[in-house]
Amino acid sequence: MNFSVCTISTKSFLHKSIAMYRSLVRFHTNLKCTIYVVDDDFNEQYNDANLSVIHARRIPLFEHFRYEIKRKPDELRWTLKSYAIDDSTKNDGNNIGIWIDNDIFFVNNIDFALRDLDECGLYVTPHWRNPEPSLTNMQFYPLAMDGMFNAGFVGVNLLKGESFLKWWQRCCAYNCSISPHLGIMGDQRYLDLSLLYFRDIVRICDNRGCNLANWNIEYIDRSGIKPIFYHFTGPYIKSINDGFDDLSRPHYEEYSTKLEEAKNDPICK
């Protein structure tokens, strides 16, 4: 099955995007990945059979959000995410498009997710935070504040989910800030509403090996699952280095090696 993948990056984090892409293409040679770069002075362009690195100005409304509304850097990337899924998937001539954060690293294939995406319109991945109310559970309040799902991996089948994608675009264009008092967490908490308003097309990833990160160390027993992909955020890397997830350390070490290799890639020079 052919499918598209996209992410948005700055030049300084382009090596992370390359490492993410290379970790996935080794399992799926039929993918097409588009990396959009937002820096004003980025003029390069790279294309091969599986990868395109281009400026984000190709994304519809990029200049509107960047220069007219003047969205902050993080808010700009969150706002453009749903537009990037739409642009990259249609430009590739595919129906299935997946957004992937550039700090994600794959250690196994995602065949199960592609099978689900062939049948549904929207594919979301839970945070799997510890849901137990306790003074010692630091993940309980973020469970409600940040949303049930992580927007670092979101899949859309345009044949069935384009109505959701257009709605998500409108939401993010309206407000993509971090405003807990308004119930808004960038682009992420809008995904919770899909369970009600797009319940006929949404499918929740039930593979606990997806989106392994610091927020689910307590809830997901690493010894009892097959890891699929890690979300190596700064806090997660610190947790591993501090000894809170030793079972994931070999994969983190592989990730670190791939990051260094990507830094020396001509694309990142």
Image (tube, rainbow, N blue to C red):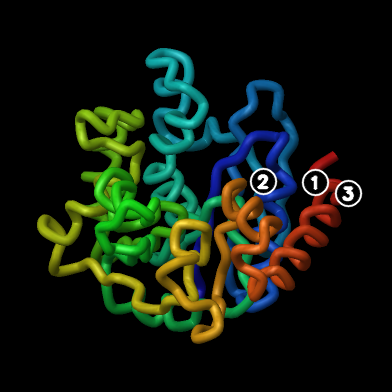
Quadrant housing residue 32: bottom right
Query: What's the amino acid at mark 2?
Result: Val
Position of 258 compared to 197: left or right?
A: right
Label 2 crowd (10 A; few <14 / some 14-19 / many >=20): many
Residue located 49% across and 68% down the image: 3
Contact (CB < 8 A) between labels 1 and 3?
no
Q: Can residue 34 be seen in this view?
A: no
Contact (CB < 8 A) between labels 1 and 2?
yes
What numbered label is drawn on residue 53? 2
Residue 218 vertical placement versus 113 (above, below) = above
Residue located 61% across and 40% down the image: 9
Give residue 165's position: percent from left, percent from top.
Answer: 28, 50
Q: Nearer the viewer, residue 20 or 249?
A: 249
Quadrant housing residue 8: top right
Residue located 56% across and 78% down the image: 227
Label 3 crowd (10 A; few <14 / some 14-19 / many >=20): few
Give residue 247's position: percent from left, percent from top.
Answer: 64, 75
Instruction: Say what secondary structure mark 2 lies in.
Output: strand
Give residue 268's position: percent from left, percent from top.
Answer: 80, 43
What numbered label is drawn on residue 264? 3
Q: How far apart are marks 1 and 3 (CA)?
A: 8 Å
Q: Can residue 71 be seen in this view?
A: yes
Residue extending farthest to the front is: 135
Q: Nearer the viewer, residue 55 or 155?
A: 155
Residue 213 vertical placement versus 2 (above, below) = above
Instruction: Say what secondary structure mark 3 lies in.
Output: loop
Q: Nearer the viewer, residue 84 or 183?
A: 183
Mark with earlier residue (3, 2): 2
Q: Name the residue under label 1.
A: 267
Q: How far apart are marks 3 and 2 (CA)?
A: 16 Å
Front tag of 1 and 3: 3
